[in-house]
Amino acid sequence: MASLTASHFAPRNSYVNSHGSETTENFVQIGLRSQSMTHSGLRSLNMVDKLQFKTQAFARKSVKKAYANGNDTPGKIVCLQGGMTVVFVATEVAPWSKTGGLGDVLGGLPPAMAARGHRVMTISPRFDQYKDAWDTCVVAQIPVGDRVETVRYFHCYKRGVDRVFVDHPMFLAKVWGKTGSKIYGPAAGEDFQDNQLRFSLFCLAALEAPRVLSLNSSKHFSGPYGEDVVFVANDWHTGLLPCYLKSMYQSRGIYMTAKVALCIHNIAYQGRFSFSDFPLLNLPDEYKSSFDFMDGYNKPVKGRKINWLKAGILEAHRVITVSPYYAQELVSGVEKGVELDNYLRTTGITGIVNGMDVQEWNPATDKYLSTKYEITTVLSAKPLLKEELQAEVGLPVDRDIPVIGFIGRLEEQKGSDILAAAIPMLVKNNVQIIVLGTGKKYMEKQIAELEKKYPDKVRGVAKFNVPLAHMIIAGADFMMIPSRFEPCGLIQLHAMRYGTVCIVSSTGGLVDTVKEGYTGFQMGAFNVECDVVDQVDVAAIVETARRALAVYGTAAFKEMIKNCMSQDLSWKVRTSQTLGEDSAKPKCYRQQSWNRRRGDCSTCQGECRHSLINVDNT
Ligand SMILES: Nc1ncnc2c1ncn2[C@@H]1O[C@H](COP(=O)(O)OP(=O)(O)O[C@H]2O[C@H](CO)[C@@H](O)[C@H](O)[C@H]2O)[C@@H](O)[C@H]1O
């Protein structure tokens, strides 16, 4: 069976050449949880506590008090003397830069951390002239390849977080914009030739920032961040960060207490390059073995390679990922671990489910919706929003026709090709299907052809369109998420918050967050082979959609809408859930009795899906 490594994945994280990027989060969650007043939380903190958690009791008490008082903004919160200094490093930070979920997480998690009393910075490239970020006039000289480059730091302070942007022509001159695929390459699926130099420069600039910037926007903190820092690196682009920390700083007595947590948002993108490129990275030879990698692919060169993500995994102090079930999948074997499973089994990996940004995604205040709503008004608001959505995309306007939405990159991970194969059968039902996504050209074409064939039933919008994404999330009755694999997935969280019932494949975070018959419908795990569309999976989509459509409009469906909306899916609650009471419940780490259709485990009656899977050998 072809592994997920094959060059199936598109651009933004291109694949065997340069690759995806995303966020940071789990580690933060660890930090959050560390204050969540549970034993297990503190236990799983063992890395963090070595860093800065010197006054845990005080911190826990203060946070408890702050939340008891309803405080959730940094302006109001008690300043925690025992809090951490956390620096998130990622190529995307919404709303300034975003091609997918990485940007979302970097947008939402840091403010949640700050609200807990931590001092929090994010660092990302300055891809555009962001109107709210000012030139600090601080520059740094950064060795990159065989030359030295000057970077400038731009800054703004939002929701308690120092947002820092690294300015250099390798970012801004190439991209000029926040959502284009040009963050990683000139077009979808292509990488910039100099991506290794770009992200090497970015990692070093990120390591300099906490030392050279003196930031004073916060009421609670001022001056440089200093050296007692927890860096949260995200995905392969930041895999060099722990290597540089050790080789260029700690070897000189700097950052001696600093640590790096590496968060994997998507292991399919690893940053594999020719082995002969190693000297470009300015690392001592002793690091070669951490990068050394053999695979059977010819991209970008045949044979021996360097692998940035592998090095990040081996050199970071801790490895985390975005859901417990994905953590399990990553260590389960070569297919889902994409040839890094054996290293992860050695280092250990902790999975903590993502939260979502409940400010950006709030049906009660959503600026893209003409009708705002919450749980008590959802049943009257949704039909209106559905009609608007139908009119917007040019489908027949009829509130009684159930609408299924799909939002995501059109590529194998997201299973848009499986959905396309299922659509001719799906449209035999009384249903409309709206697909919003960009990605591989042949998949965009597939959707366009289906639209031509079924003009009254199918719409495909091949654009990155945030307002329309909000309209679909609110106006659709169901959200279809047929991913071959899904580390966590944010679409289903957004959808549930808006009372839109999800139909999901049983993988990664979709297993952890969508409960069969209660908040959605599970389709079972799909074949991860990317170069085939498995007819069993097509049938699973058709059969599950039929099951969901049969419930549409019934009292049970209304109940599901309410179940979805009554969950708190924010970062705040996520963190306390995962490290809090759920970690005390019985766990089924292997989920041997997993029922792929029902989406739960008969041994634990589903409880295992909320447990913290800590595959930790350290
Ligand atoms: N055409 C379009 N127009 C407008 N908006 C669009 C869009 N296509 C996608 N989006 C938006 O981009 C985000 C995608 O979120 P996903 O969780 O699917 O992320 P992705 O796969 O990129 O991220 C990876 O990282 C995240 C974060 O850890 C994991 O949840 C996920 O499983 C992993 O694959 C959503 O906010 C969605 O609305």
Image (tube, rainbow, N blue to C red):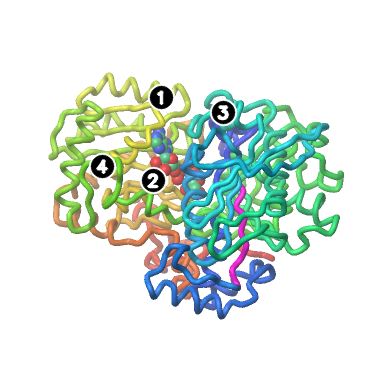
Q: Nearer the viewer, residue 238 or 431?
A: 238
Distance between mark 4 and mark 3 Cα atoms = 30 Å
Over which residues does the magenta segment extend? Answer: 82-90
Considering only vertical position in the picture, is 449 above or below 229? Answer: above
User: Is 535 left, or right, of 262 in this rendering?
Assistant: left
Estimate the spatial distance between the alpha carbons at disc 3 and disc 1, rounded to whole Å: 23 Å
N-terminal of the pair, mark 3 or mark 2, is 3
State the separation of the CA atoms marked 2 and 4: 17 Å
Task: Look at the picture and state if 165 lies above or below 83.
Answer: above
Which residue is denoted by mark 3 in the rendering? 175
**Mark drawn on residue 207:** none
The kind of residue on which mark 2 rests is Ile
**Left or right for 68, reference 231:** left
Q: Is residue 346 visible?
A: no
**Can you see residue 227?**
yes
Q: Which residue is mark 1?
A: 444
- SS at mark 3 in the image: helix
Residue drawn 35% across and 30% down? 421
Q: Could you tell me which residue is drawn at 47 percent across and 63 percent down? A: 74
Disc 4: which residue: 369
Query: Which mark is first along the chain, 4 or 1?
Result: 4
Quadrant of the drawing holding the C terminus: bottom right
Check disc 4 and give the amino acid type.
Leu
- Residue count near mark 4 (Cα–Cα under 10 Å), binned few <14, some 14–19, many ≥20: some
31 to the left or right of 204: left
Q: Quadrant of residue 16?
A: top right
Mark 2 neighbour density, 10 Å: few (under 14) some (14–19) many (20 or more):
many
SS category of the residue bearing label 2: helix
Specify the amino acid type for callout 1.
Answer: Glu
Where residue 43 appears, x then y in whole percent?
Answer: 59, 74
Q: Which residue is mark 2?
A: 491
